[in-house]
Amino acid sequence: MGRARRVIAGSILVAGTAGSWWLAGQARTPQALAAQAEPPAPSVITVPVRWERTGPVIPVSALQPTGDRARIHTNRGPIQIDVVKEAEGWLSISAPPGSIRPGDQVRVWPR
C-alpha cells in the first residue's frame, strides 16, 4: 500500500499501515488517541474513618451528597461504598463487613 500525503492545517499527514498514522513526525495509534481523549481522573483524597455505633463514617467533604456511590481504597484493598446518610458533618457509609476498621485512613475517588 502506498503512502498518501495531504496538507491539513499546515501539517503533513502520512497514512501508515497496521492502524497507525503519523502527524508532524509523531506516530499515533488509535488506542493512544482514545487514551488522550479520556477525561482526567478525579482527584484522590485521603480521609479518616470514624467509628460510630452504627458503623463507619467519613467526613462530609470527602463525597457528594447522600445516595452517591464511591470507590475507596483501604489497607486491605479497594471496595465500593454507598453513602447512607449525613449527620453533623460526617457521612454514614455502607461497606462490606470487615472492609473498614476503626482508625482506618481511606483514599476516596468521588464519582
Image: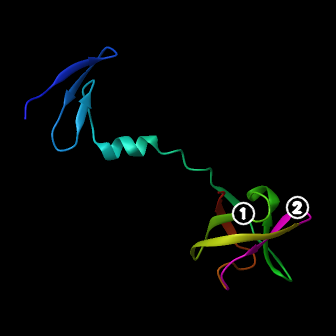
Q: Going by the picture, which residue comes out furthest to the right?
A: 88
Residue at left offset 41%, top offset 46%:
35
Residue drawn at x 24%, y 31% is: 22
Please tell me whether mark 1 or mark 2 is closer to you in this view: 1
Q: Nearer the viewer, residue 15 or 73?
A: 15
Location of residue 87 (image quadrant): bottom right
Q: Is residue 54 left or right of residue 5?
A: right
The quadrant of the picture occupied by the C terminus is: bottom right
Judging depth in this view, the residue of 56 and 83 nearest the camera is 83
Could you tell me the amino acid type at mark 1? Asp
Mark with earlier residue (1, 2): 1
Q: Quadrant of the N terminus?
A: top left
- Residue at far bottom of view: 97
**Start-end of magenta stretch:** 87-97
Residue linked to disc 1 = 68
Residue 88, magenta (yes or no): yes
Q: Is residue 54 above or below residue 40?
A: below
Residue 47's quadrant in the figure? bottom right
* Residue 89 numbered mark, or none: 2
At x 27% / y 23%, what residue is drawn?
24
Position of residue 49 measured from the top left corner of the image (x, y, whole percent): 76, 70
Percent position (x, y) of residue 64? 75, 57
Based on the picture, tell me whether residue 53 belongs to the magenta stretch: no
